[in-house]
Structures are given as C-alpha cells and as structure tokens.
Image: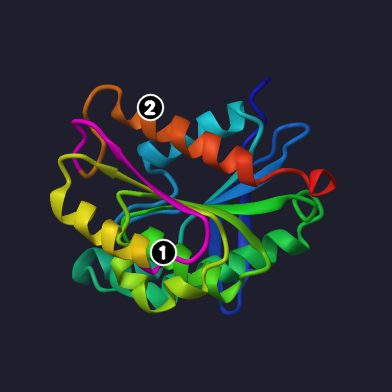
C-alpha cells in the first residue's frame, strides 16, 4: 500500500486551536487518534513510527498537539499541564468530535493510541465518548491516573508495558483489574519505559496494529 500524504490540519476546539497531522490511506478501515505523553508532541519519533506501521496496515492516523503554543511554553517551565489529565481528555474528546464531523473521516471507526500520561487522558476521553471509541492501545501508559473511570470504558483495551519498567507494570496490572471491557496486558521483553532497546518499539507497533485492525473493522463488517 502506498503511503498516504500527510496533511497538516487545524482543530478549533472551543477557544483553543491545535495543530494535527492527518493521513488517510485509500480504503482505510479505521482511524487512530494519537495522544502523546508527558512533555511530548505530535512530532514524537516513537509515535510517528507507530503511526507509519498502522498506516501500512491500512489504518488512518491523526497525531495532534494536545496543548497550544502558549500552553506548551508554560508546560516547559512548570510541567503542570502534562499531568492535567482532565484537560488533555477534553482535548481528545473534542478531537474525536472533530473527526466525526470531518467528511474524510466520519465513516471510519475511531481508535486511540496513548503513551504515558496521554494514555490516561485517552481512557478518560473514551469513558466520556463510549459510543464513539472502538479500541484503545496504551504504550507505557499511566492508566492509574484514570482509575476512577476505567469501569466505564467500553472499548477493547490493550496495555503494553516494557518488562524493565517495573513500577509501570504494577500500575497497569492494577488498572487491568478495573477495566470491564475486553482487555489484555502485553509485556515486551527487555524493554524500558521508552522502548529504546533494539526491536522493542517494533514489537509495540505490531501489537498495536494487530489489536486495532481487529477492532476497527469497517461498519459494514459488523
């Protein structure tokens, strides 16, 4: 499958304008909204790599900045907004609504791919949009920061953690017990929190691709 052209889009979410990168392969079966982690952005090389693998598998992707330029400058100084899970979740939910209103994507099932604190925000947004989100993948996520809403998440959820990321493994195991939807915890051997070890990010991308393809079938197939 040829690589689709990436399009820079502006998302007007209330009084805030955020930038995103949208790419829709021909015949895409679903679209994945990326929620980046602490101190990161839509330019994260790890998320961009995973997005490329998903597109090669036939999924569309939308990578967005969850903070505007002024907020990013503030967060660089204080590291406060990256842990404001409810603010980030509202942005993800609003981006979900934007996708539903976008003629190029409105027919596609929506999945979330969240990393670190972005995974917590994605889970909160999924609890707020239970009929719009069809699958979730968390990479090195902090689902413990969304513990109060996990029981309301309807979307099948895959939690991926590195085997050497011991504190986060336990956080994910606790979260797994609170999730009521279809769920799975995969632990990638030899990987630390950022999956920087050779071959580990590739494993994350394949796990994510297979999970999302399984749950983002076209509406006509369900």
Residue at mark 2: 202
Position in image of residue 13 (x %, y %): 60, 72
Q: Nearer the viewer, residue 39 or 136?
A: 136
- Which quadrant holds residue 74? bottom left
Q: Is residue 122 magenta?
A: no
Along the line of sight, the residue nearer the viewer: 134 or 57? 134
Q: Which residues are magenta?
A: 178-192
Sequence-earlier tag: 1 or 2: 1
Q: Is residue 125 left or right of residue 36?
A: right
Residue at point 53% right, 35% down? Answer: 209
Report the residue marked by disc 1: 69
**Helix, strand or loop at mark 1:** helix
The structure residue drawn at horizontal position 57% and vertical position 70%, both measured from the top left corner, is 93
For residue 52, above or below residue 32: above
Colour scheme in use: rainbow
Residue 7 appears in the rendering = no
- On screen, 126 above or below 53? below
């Amino acid at each position: 499958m040829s690589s689709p052209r990436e399009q820079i889009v502006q998302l007007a979410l209330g009084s805030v304008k955020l930038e995103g990168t949208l790419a829709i392969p021909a015949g895409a079966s679903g679209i994945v909204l990326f929620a980046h982690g602490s101190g990161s952005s839509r330019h994260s090389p790890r998320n961009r790599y995973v997005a490329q693998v998903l597109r090669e598998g036939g999924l569309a992707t939308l990578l967005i900045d969850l903070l505007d330029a002024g907020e990013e400058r503030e967060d660089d100084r204080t590291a406060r907004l990256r842990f404001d899970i409810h603010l980030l979740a509202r942005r993800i939910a609003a981006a979900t609504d934007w996708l539903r209103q976008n003629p190029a994507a409105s027919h596609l099932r929506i999945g979330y791919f969240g990393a670190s604190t972005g995974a917590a925000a994605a889970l909160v947004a999924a609890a707020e949009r239970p009929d719009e989100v069809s699958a979730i993948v968390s990479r090195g996520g902090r689902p413990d920061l969304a513990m109060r809403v996990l029981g309301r998440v309807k979307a099948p959820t895959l939690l991926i953690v590195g085997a050497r990321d011991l504190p986060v493994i336990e956080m994910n195991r606790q979260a797994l017990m609170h999730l009521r939807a279809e769920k799975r915890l995969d632990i990638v051997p030899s990987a630390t929190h950022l999956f920087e070890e050779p071959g580990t990010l590739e494993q994350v991308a394949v796990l994510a691709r297979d999970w999302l393809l399984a749950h983002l079938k076209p509406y006509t197939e369900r």
